[in-house]
Image: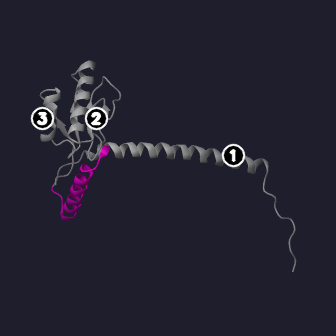
Amino acid sequence: MKIPVYEEIILQGNGKEYLADFIPLSRIGRVPSYINAQKLSKIELINFLDNLEDALRDNKLNPLFPYPLYVITEELNDYNSIPLLKTVKELPEHFYKKVKRPNNKEMQLLNKLYLRVEKVGNLDMLKLVENLKDSSLKQKDLYTKTKELYFLEKLHDFYFPPQKDTKKTKR
C-alpha cells in the first residue's frame, strides 16, 4: 500500500449516471481526495452535491471515513455530510507528505492500515455516525450538568466553609 496523500478527482461530467459509474472506478474512500468545484454556480453546485451524496451512498462510501473526500467551493459553507472548503490550502496538512519509499517497519504499518481501511469499508457508516452524534450529545449534556454542579459546590464551600474540628484529643 502506498502512503496516503491527497489526490485531486477530476470529473468530466456531474450527472447522476456519470457519478454512479465514475465513483466505483475512482479511489474515493481509499485515499484522501478532493474535488475542485469552484467553476460551478450555486444551483449547479447543489445539484452536483446531491448527486454526489446519492452516488456515495449507493456505493456504500462515506465522505469522512476511512479517508475524507472534500469539495472545494466558495459558494456554500456547509452541506449535509460532505465537507466543503473554500481553497485547496485549507485542506488538513497531515495528508501532505513527500512520497518516498517506506522502510520495512513503515511497510508493516501501512499493511495494517490497509486492513483497517478495508474493515471500515465493510461497516455501516451511516448508523455509526448517527450513534456517534447521539452519544456526543449525551456526553455534552452530562458535561454541562457536572460543570454546573461543580460551580454550585464551590459556591457552597465559599459561603459555608467546612467546620474545622477545634478539639484535639490528648493522650
Q: Amino acid at mark 1?
A: Leu
Q: CA distance from mark 3 to mark 1?
A: 59 Å
In magenta stretch: residue 108: yes
Considering the numbered disc 1 on the image, is that residue within a helix, a strand or a loop? helix
Considering the numbered disc 3 on the image, is that residue within a helix, a strand or a loop? helix
Considering the numbered disc 2 on the image, is that residue within a helix, a strand or a loop? helix
If you read the primary sequence from the N terminus, does the residue marked by circle 2 or circle 1 appear first? 2
* x and y, in percent, of residue 26 in the image: 14, 40
In magenta stretch: residue 115: yes
Mark 1 nearby-residue class (10 Å; few <14, some 14–19, many ≥20): few
Q: Which mark is residue 152?
A: 1
* x and y, in percent, of residue 28 in the image: 20, 41
Q: Amino acid at mark 2?
A: Lys
Q: Please give the range of residues in magenta.
A: 101-125
Q: Which mark is residue 89?
A: 2
**Which residue is disc 3 drawn over?**
21
Tell me which corner region of the image, top left, top right, bottom left or bottom right, holds residue 171: bottom right
Q: What residue is shown at x 30% (from left), y 22% (from top)?
A: 75
Instruction: Report the front residue among 15 and 13.
Output: 15
- Picture layout, residue 36 above or below residue 128: above
Looking at the image, is mark 3 or mark 1 nearer the viewer? 3
* x and y, in percent, of residue 43 in the image: 26, 19
Q: What residue is shown at x 18% (from left), y 62% (from top)?
A: 103
